[in-house]
Image (cartoon, rainbow, N blue to C red):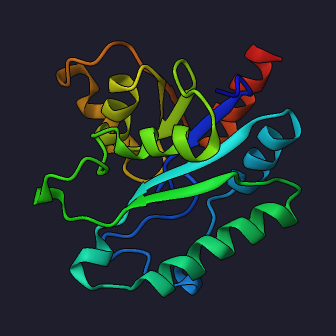
């Protein structure tokens, strides 16, 4: 497997504004301040960027595969315009109670990422805003990082009760990436 640096990012609440009513169209996909530049910085310093996202709105019939493809196309185009590149976007379309292996906190999306992109994610960072992101990262031997955007502030309040090891917490994706680049560079 390729030993190139790879990072996994959750989508809603990390890269873009989240909504309890789901991001249903490309028009509703609005990047958080600094997130596109942060992804571009990662790309410029040699990282592969993989987005792993739960999208139960598909199973709920809130949006369809075509709408989701348009959202991800917009994300990729906006990152490219900012000088970056997203290696791939993987998503779980299932409901939380379906018992699939891909919905975070399960690790199916991470297994899929390793196979599809020929990378090893062990020891790599996974940046998310929810306990399911953090638990998925830990279960796969990754370094979980929490951002306070999206559901992150609420998640941070539950960390002490979650029995997780200490986790790095940043106000947003830009600050998390700046720290990663400064630490690794």
x 21%, y 53%: residue: 100
Residue 157, picture quadrant? top left
Check the image and name the residue furthest to the left: 97
Q: Is residue 147 at all visible to an observer of this figure?
A: no
- Image quarter of the N terminus: top right
Residue 121, picture quadrant? top right
x 55%, y 78%: residue: 69
Q: Where does residue 30 sit, x and y in percent of width and height?
A: 60, 72
Q: Is residue 171 left or right of residue 104?
A: right
In this view, 155 is above or below 37: above
In this view, 142 is above or below 132: above
Q: Where does residue 130 sit, x and y in percent of width and height?
A: 34, 43
Q: Where does residue 124 sit, x and y in percent of width and height?
A: 57, 24
Q: Nearer the viewer, residue 142 or 149?
A: 142
Q: Is residue 119 left or right of residue 110?
A: right
x 51%, y 34%: residue: 126
Number of numbered discs on residues: 0
x 86%, y 33%: residue: 45
In this view, 180 is above or below 129: above
Q: Nearer the viewer, residue 40 or 65?
A: 65
Q: Where does residue 52 sit, x and y in percent of width and height?
A: 48, 50
Residue 43, picture quadrant? top right
């Amino acid at each position: 497997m390729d030993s190139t640096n790879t990072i996994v990012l959750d989508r809603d609440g990390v890269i873009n504004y989240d909504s309890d009513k789901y991001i249903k169209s490309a028009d509703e996909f609005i990047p958080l301040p600094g997130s596109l530049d942060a992804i571009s910085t990662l790309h410029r310093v040699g990282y592969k960027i993989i987005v792993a996202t739960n999208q139960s709105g598909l199973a709920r019939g809130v949006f369809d595969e075509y709408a989701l493809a348009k959202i991800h196309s917009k994300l990729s185009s906006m990152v490219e315009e900012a000088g970056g590149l997203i290696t791939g976007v993987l998503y779980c379309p299932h409901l939380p109670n379906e018992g699939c292996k891909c919905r975070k906190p399960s690790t199916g999306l991470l297994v899929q990422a390793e196979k599809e992109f020929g990378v090893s994610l062990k020891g790599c960072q996974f940046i998310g805003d929810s306990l399911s992101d953090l638990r998925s990262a830990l279960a796969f031997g990754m370094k979980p990082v929490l951002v306070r955007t999206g559901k992150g502030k609420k998640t941070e309040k539950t960390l002490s009760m979650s029995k997780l090891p200490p986790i790095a917490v940043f106000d947003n994706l830009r600050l998390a990436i700046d720290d990663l680049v400064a630490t690794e560079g």
